[in-house]
Amino acid sequence: MRAPPARARVVCSSSVSVVPAAALTPGPGRSCPELGMFPELNNLLNITPDRAEQGKLTLLCDAKTDGSFLVHHFLSFYLKANCKVCFVALIQSFSHYNIVGQKLGVSLTAARECGQLVFLEGLKSSVDVFFRAQAEPHPLQFLREADAGNLQPLYEFVREALKPMDDGRAAWRCPVLLVDDLSVLLSLGLGAVAVLDFIHYCRVAVCWERKGNIVTLVHDSGDGEDEENDILLNGLSHQSHLILRAEGLATGFCRDVHGQLRILWRTPSQPTAQRDGSLTYQYKIQDKSVSFFAKGMSPAVL
Amino acid sequence: MAAVATCGTGVGSTGSIVAATSKNNVTSFQRKGPRASGTDSGCSRLVSIAGTRPSVRNGQLLVSTGLPALDQLLGGGLAVGTVLLIEEDKYNIYSSLLFKYFLAEGIINGHTLLVASAKEDPADILQELPAPLLDDNYKKDFDKDVCNPQTPDSNIKMKIAWRYQLLPKIESGPVSSSRFGHYYDASKRMPQELIEASKWHGFFFPEKLSSTLNIEPCSLTHGYRKLLQFIQKVIYEEGFDGSNPQKKQKNILRIGIQNLGSPLWGDDICCTENCDNSHSLTKFLYVLRGLLRTSLSACIITMPTHLIQNKAIIARVTNLSDTVVGLESFIGSERETNPLYKDYHGLIHIRQIPRLNNLIYDVSDVKDLAFKLKRKLFTIEGGKTDDFQAPFIQDQKQEVSKRLHLPPDLSDTVSRSSKQDLAESSKLLGPGCGMMAGGKQHLDF
């Protein structure tokens, strides 16, 4: 089934008024639409598309809220940074990310056509894998297997997608693997150890060999009911350089503050925690951006 | 958010106006191609499908769930290509009612239905669908009640509602209706000719058990696998995914799956905590979602989550579904005799609303919602945050008056009598209202 290009969509201006939030850094408070992603988050993380770090594993985690805005941020960030991105999108369809990406200033269709983006659409491929026997091993081959499989075909796919160009010239900057999300792999019959193995292999191939980055999202159930998920989350937290944790507010739902973001910098290789820093901000998601502010400093409250 | 709130009371009228104008001429409300990436390019952008409307926020194609109040809570309706998961109430009374409303809405709009059940024959389910309340029937019922001397103040209530209902003029034909959401009379059955005129496919699991073909071992239980194959066959053959060049389908497929996860489907997650095939249900949901995202269909699933022993599975199922609504009925619980809840039959919890093609989503301000099956209509009303969670307090009278201090409720029968109550109760609360009143008062935001 070939997917024809997405049709023109309805253009409806949103009626939600954008709350002008005071930025914490002395940088400009307004977001430039051509920059895309969330400039305030870039300021908090102290990164710009020109100076993206390399060889890092970033873990995105959400507890009692939806952390997918972080995935959209990193996707548009790395596309803007001219990196080659392999996106394993297991939860939503391509057009979902494309439409949100357009709001953030990147075009996924253009990136896919020129080869910057390799997109594995999990939902569509799962239908193909499940109903028709494939000739060659498919990245989602584990869907057909009766017992707990492993993710080796998926790893081969990622490796193939991010391999360097044959002619030696560096068309793109460092390769990036983006996975949304890893928790769904546990729901599909794989064990936590298999998923951890997969990430380990990808780290060797992407972070170590090619000096690239990996960004992945894991849900946190929070109550300790899902043991496999906790194993996966703890294992990944231990290996990550940067952990972004989106949490719902402890006091419940609020219209003006959608949640709290905890940023934790780690250096897993060094035993002494000399650069382990952590910051906490609250955020509000708007139509095209996310505004961050210190705890209790929401513009709605001040 | 403001736009959603203001169009709350007139949800029926605005929806129908949109549908009417988009049928008549070229407007800015063009049907956005949803995630049905397979729809053929010959289908022009201006053709609109009966019973759907684009979402105000992002142009997503929406269908009605059969309950206009629930549509409003979900941000306008159920998006095409998504799954609505209903967590059943304890005795499966109200969840099966919502299930039937969904199917009845499909019949009224002329959608194709696919009904899957392991407990009842789909033909029997279709016989029990509620009858739609078209305008002239509605008026007849209310005129009958007007003659009833027992309820004098209800006259005002129904007359106002009657005028609301008249706003979009509905043809008196049996099926054709340009409204988006319809009201149903739970005490009457859908007319037989409507059911026979509709197109539906049934999947009754005990019947399919007999035909066991030679299948390769898969971690899905047998029932789920056959159901997936059946759904995929219908979608492909009827052309809902656009891959069949002969069939140009411009209709929505409404899939209804009843009691998914119950032991009748061959799954044991409701029986034991450490089940052998704990991934069967989640894998099924994943592949089902993949099928839905690539076709013009919407799915409702009712699941007895209160029976699932392993709580982790409930969290995974919630993450794999798009919209999740939980029902909690008061039957048999201590709340049945609580005067706080005397008008209501249960609580509705909106557990999850998807963010589709967007960073944000429409969320209603009212978080505590109760439903009641009143005068044959299913209505949903909301209260302040802690009204329905309030524990027993000695001063019952104060508690009851606090409950009446409601924001504009979401039901469509707003009456003058309840507005008077609001005014009185706000006076009552005046001096004592607020967080500083005393130690017994719990926090009230």
Image (cartoon, grey):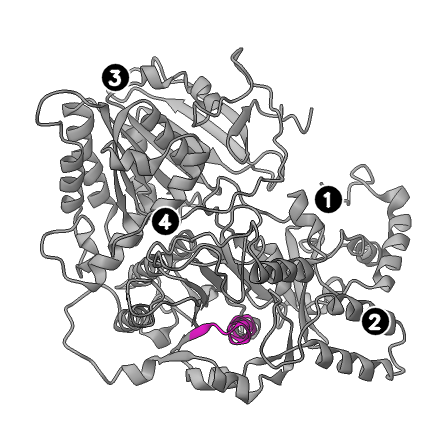
Which of the labelled discs sits on residue A226, or is there none?
4
Labels 1, 4: one chain: no
The chain holding disc 1 is: B
Q: Residue at x 69, y 61 (%)?
A: B13
Q: Say if mark 1 contacts mark 3, CB within 8 Å.
A: no
Q: Which residues are magenta?
A: B97-113
How far apart in space, not on screen, are marks 1 and 3 (Cα)? 49 Å
Is A142 magenta? The answer is: no
- Residue, disc 3: A270
Crowding at dot 1, Cα within 10 Å, few <14 / some 14-19 / many 20+, comes out as: some
Image coordinates of residue A249 in percent, x first then y, are 56, 36
Q: Amino acid at mark 2?
A: Lys
The front one of B138 and B49 is B49
Query: Residue type at mark 1?
Result: His
The answer to whether mark 2 and mark 1 are in CB contact below 8 A is no
Q: Residues within 10 Å of mark 4 (few under 14, many from 20)?
A: some
Identify residue for label 1: B442
Side of B193 where B271 appears, left or right: left
Earlier in the chain: of badge 3 and badge 4, it is 4
- Seen at 87% across and 64% down, the residue is B417
- Asked if badges 2 and 1 are on one and the same chain, I answer yes
Name the residue rendered at 81%, 72% in the picture: B158
Residue B154 shows in this picture:
yes
* Placement of the N terminus of chain B among the 4 image quadrants: top right
State whether residue B385 appears in this view: no
Q: Which residue is mark 2?
A: B159
